[in-house]
Amino acid sequence: MDLGVLQLTVAPYLWYRDPMPQKTLAVANFFVERGSAEGIPIDPLKLQKLVYFGHGWHLAVTGEPLIDECIEAWPYGPVVPTIYHEFKRYGYSPITSPATEFVLREDVAPARTVVLSDGYWTTPRVTDSRALTVLEKVWREYGKFSGVYLSNISHTAGSPWDVAWKKAKAGGKVRGADIPDHEMRQYFYAAGLRERSRR
C-alpha cells in the first residue's frame, strides 16, 4: 500500500535540526483542531495514525523526532500511550475538544501536595514553525482518510509497526513494544526517495 505523495524534500537530514521534540499532546491537538476547523471528524484511531505518520515523515525530513515519547506497536497498529489515555473516552466517536494539561507555577515545589491555585490549565500547541510545515503537509495528504484506511497503511508488510509487532509477538509481548525511531526514519526516508524517483 502506498504511503501517499507527501510533497516534502527528503534530504539526508540537512533540512534543519529541531532543538527539541514537540509535546505529544500538542501534536495531537494540531490534528484535532485542524479537523474541527475543516469539518473533518477525527476519532482516536485516526488521530493515532496521523501522529504516527507525522512522526515518521518528520524523522525522514529532519532526522529528529517530532514527539517527545516513543510510539509503541499494539495489536491494531502504532499507538502513542499518552494519546490513547487522553482520548480513549471518545471510543469510535469524533474527538470534540483538544487535550489540556495542568502546568505548575515555577515557584511551586513539586514534592508537596498540589492544589489548583498552584498552576493553570493550558492547551498544548506545536511551537516550531518547521514542525508545523511537516504537520500541514501530513494533514493535506492523510487528513481526508478514515482511521481504518490509515491503519491499513500503517500495517503494510515491512512497515516499522509490522517489524516491531512481529518481534514483540515472537518475544511473547502483546503490547508496549517500542517502534524505534531509527527504523521509522529509514522507512519513511526510503518511501520519500521512492516517491521522488517516480517524478
Image: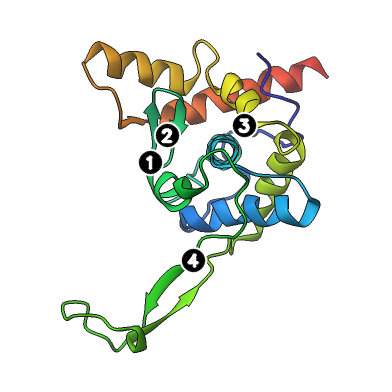
Quadrant where the image shows the C terminus: top right
Residue 170 visible within the image:
yes
Secondary structure, mark 2, is helix
**Closer to the camera in the image, 96 or 68:** 96
Q: Closer to the N terminus: mark 1 or mark 4? A: 1
Q: Which residue is drawn at 61% across and 21% down?
A: 153
- The residue nearer to you, when weighing 93 against 142, is 93
Of label 2 and label 4, which has the lower sequence position? 4
Compare marks 4 and 3 and give the one earlier in the sequence.
Answer: 4
Q: Who's the residue at 52% across and 65% down the image?
A: 124
Toward the viewer: 139 or 5? 139
Q: In the rendered image, which residue does mark 4 sit on? A: 100
Question: Which of the 4 image quadrants contains residue 108?
Answer: bottom left
Which residue lies under the disc numbered 1?
70
Looking at the rendered image, the quarter that the N terminus falls into is top right
The three-letter amino acid code for the residue at tag 3 is Gly
Few, some or many residues within 10 Å of mark 2 (<14, 14–19, 20+): some
Single out the mark in the foreground, 3 or 2. 3
What residue sits right under mark 3 in the picture?
Answer: 147
* Mark 1 residue type: Cys
Q: Mark 2 points at which residue?
A: 181
Q: How far apart are marks 1 and 4 (CA)?
A: 20 Å
**Is 97 situated above or below 95?**
below
First reached walking from the N terminus: tag 2 or tag 1: 1
Q: Position of residue 14 (x, y in %)?
A: 60, 42
The CA distance from mark 3 to mark 1 is 20 Å
**Color style of the picture:** rainbow
Q: Alpha-carbon neighbours of circle 4 within 10 Å: few (<14), some, or many (≥20)?
A: some
Q: Which amino acid does label 2 sit on?
A: Asp
Q: Amino acid type of disc 4?
A: Thr
Mark nearer the viewer, 2 or 1: 1
